[in-house]
Amino acid sequence: MLNVAIIGCGYWGNHLVRNFYTSTLWNVKYICDKDKNQLDKISSKYSNITSLTNPEQIFDDATIDAVVIATPVFSHFELAKKSLLSNKHTWVEKPLAASSEEAKELIEIAKSRNLILHVDHTYIYTPAVRKIKELIDNNVLGDMLYFDSTRVNLGLFQHDINVIWDLAPHDISILQYTIGKKPISVSATGKSFYKYNNKDIASISFIYIEFDDGSIAHINVNWMSPVKIRQIIMGGSSKMLVFDDMETVSKIKVYDSGVDFKKREDIYDVLIQYRTGDMYSPAIKNYEALSFECNHFYDSIVKDIETDTNGETGLYVVSILEAADKSLTLGGTPIQI
């Protein structure tokens, strides 16, 4: 077993503590949160874990193999840097950092010390997204033309980040993992309808990404929707795919639909014909993504191999978030990346 410490015991930290604690591969030695009330709530369930309000003891403890950071985005860089500099493999909640420069520095430190830097893009470890990647890798959809996602619900407003930094990392990470194209331009529009702690924090945004091969992505994120929607449509030259995470059974549907171009030799016109064929829903496995991710992190450490959501993938996500945020402040001006 490897010894792990978890910093941050909020909503997501609670899930992390549970999964690491129940794993046969990990021993949770410390949990840490500066909020004593929140810490007491968690520690009451796990009396054999040492609870701390200051993480310095974690960094000073040579027996700790890995540190898990589930704190607000603005604190990721400082905590992850201290963790890596104390020679501990480091797991960071999404997004990796508040800027691409911070992300790059963390990547360099991890590389220089031969440490695993893992970003908690949990969607990548869901059976549905693993199946989507399998379908794309096997060229079932053909050449990827577009990626269109909608991630909306009512709340939860964040006090320190806007809706882009809160919700879009999920879809960008799925885009990176399944398709992995190189973005060249990002633009974003959006609106802040209410002041939150006297700050204008965008609660609705529409992000548009262009890739080097001419394909595109569109991401709609919204904290002010009366309904909760978690849907991604991927359009390929051969088939199209719909991933609806709100579905309990048929989360993925593959459609034999598309556009065919046929040339009429007599008048040299191109005829556009729409093709509508069968739909099927591939079978996917059933397991808890976070439990799978914890095991994956362990395997990466003991085998000295990169995780599927390493620092480089974290940088990919942060660079797009950063460009989208900048475009948003400039009224939608495209930002080259």
Image: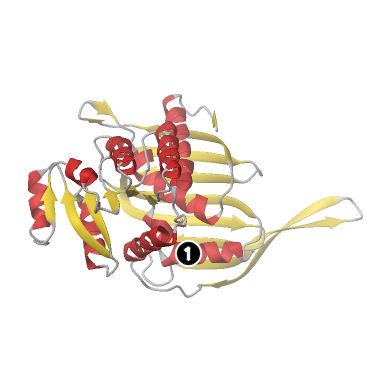
Image quadrant in which the C terminus is located: top right
Position of residue 74 in the picture relative to residue 53 (left or right): right
- Choose top left, top right, bottom left or bottom right for residue 136: bottom right
Q: Is residue 205 above or below residue 232?
A: above
Q: Residue at x 34, y 43 (%)?
A: 84
Q: Give the amino acid type for the residue marked by disc 1 in the picture.
A: Arg
- Secondary structure of the residue carrying tag 1 is helix
Report the front residue among 273 and 116. 116
Report the front residue among 133 and 309. 309
Q: Residue at x 30, y 42 (%)?
A: 86
Q: Is residue 71 above or below residue 131?
A: above
x then y, percent, for residue 118 = 39, 51
Which residue in the protein does label 1 denote?
Answer: 130
Q: How many marks?
A: 1
In the displayed image of the protein, which residue is found farthest to the front? 62
Q: Is residue 283 above or below residue 202?
A: below
Crowding around mark 1 (Cα neighbors within 10 Å: few <14, some 14 to 19, many 20+) is some
Q: Quick check: can you spot residue 192?
A: yes
